[in-house]
Amino acid sequence: MTVDLPHLYAGKVREMYDAGDGTLLIVASDRLSAFDVVMAEPVPDKGRVLTAISAFWFEQLADVAPNHLISTNIADFPDGAKDPELAGRTMHVRKAEMLPIECIVRGYVAGSAWKEYDDTGTIHGVSVETGLSKSAKLSEPLFTPSTKAQDGLHDENISYERAVDMVGAELAAKARDISLELYSRAADYAAERGIIIADTKFELGLIDGELVIADEVLTPDSSRFWPADQWEPGATPPSFDKQPVRDFLDSLEWDKTPPPPPVPDSVIASAAERYVEGYERLTGRSFSNWV
């Protein structure tokens, strides 16, 4: 895959390029990160699934807040970005001044939220209803921001008050309100299709002083998608993402630091199927029509 544009950033999954005129090219690779370690084996078409889902949600939620997407069509990309391998996995976007916080919304008690709740009865330091079990649904969604980790570090869960200190009261309130509305709309939509969105992480930024949705949105890499018919409080449901890889790695005596152990082809194939199934169930569209 060749991109003849200035390379700005290489993340665990995405590559970013300067596309000129205040725009960027974001390319989603098939790399897979588990426990903050990038596996040696890619997941076929994972980058295309992530891009397809983001494009779908940008379209569905455009009335909640504007977004940074210009096009996912390779024909619209600038010269230097015409490699056919970019098709389906690339977004041409407007450059935004990103907020220094992750805008996380939780509708269910899972992940780090469950660990904290189980220990202290709080989520991000805030007291919530008592008697909840693992994976239980909250009485109402919670906005639970975090910091954005620098390379090699982990995000830090923070209080809303600290988010206010970081971005100001007006911007924090706008980010909270947009994030909660995005989550509620998406969760209702997904529920009609038999999918629970347990939690998700939004990236918001400013373009010409307006708060917009940026980066990926409501993908299996930024959210927990659970099949509704397999959810029950007290247990962790399977998810439409890299869960087969996480389960395999958890079965090993691996300390979760590089280098990662080899992942069998069958496990990679299972993860690839999960990603595609999640896209098709959510959107009602055939993934083959996207690629």
Image: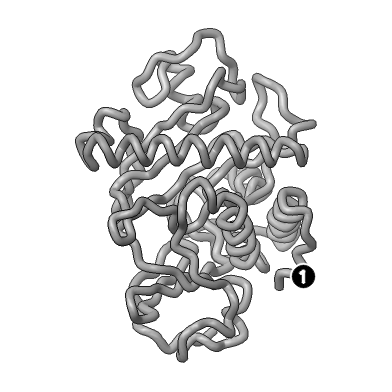
In the current view of this chain or complex, which residue is farthest to the front? 63
- How far across and down, in percent of the image, does residue 86 sit? 57, 79
Q: Quadrant where the C terminus lies?
A: bottom right
> How many marks are shown on the rendered structure?
1
Front residue of 269 and 140: 140
Front residue of 52 and 157: 52
Check the image and report above or below for 87 versus 126: below
Check the image and report above or below for 121 versus 162: above
Front residue of 171 and 53: 171
Check the image and report above or below for 165 versus 258: above
Residue 186 lies left or right of residue 20; in this view the side is: right
Q: Amino acid at mark 1?
A: Asn
User: Residue at left 48%, top 17%?
Assistant: 118
- How far across and down, in percent of the image, does residue 176 sit? 39, 36
State the residue position of label 1.
289
User: Residue at left 31%, top 42%?
Assistant: 147
Residue 54 lies left or right of residue 227; in this view the side is: left
Colour mapping used in the image: one colour
User: Residue at left 56%, top 18%?
Assistant: 139
Let me know if residue 275 appears in the view: yes
- How far across and down, in percent of the image, does residue 169 sit? 24, 34
Q: Quadrant where the N terminus lies?
A: bottom right
User: Residue at left 46%, top 19%?
Assistant: 117
Check the image and report above or below for 252 versus 19: above
Q: Mark 1, residues whose alpha carbon is within 10 Å: few (<14), some, or many (≥20)?
A: few
For label 1, the SS is helix
Let me know if residue 238 appears in the view: no
- How far across and down, in percent of the image, does residue 66 sit? 46, 55
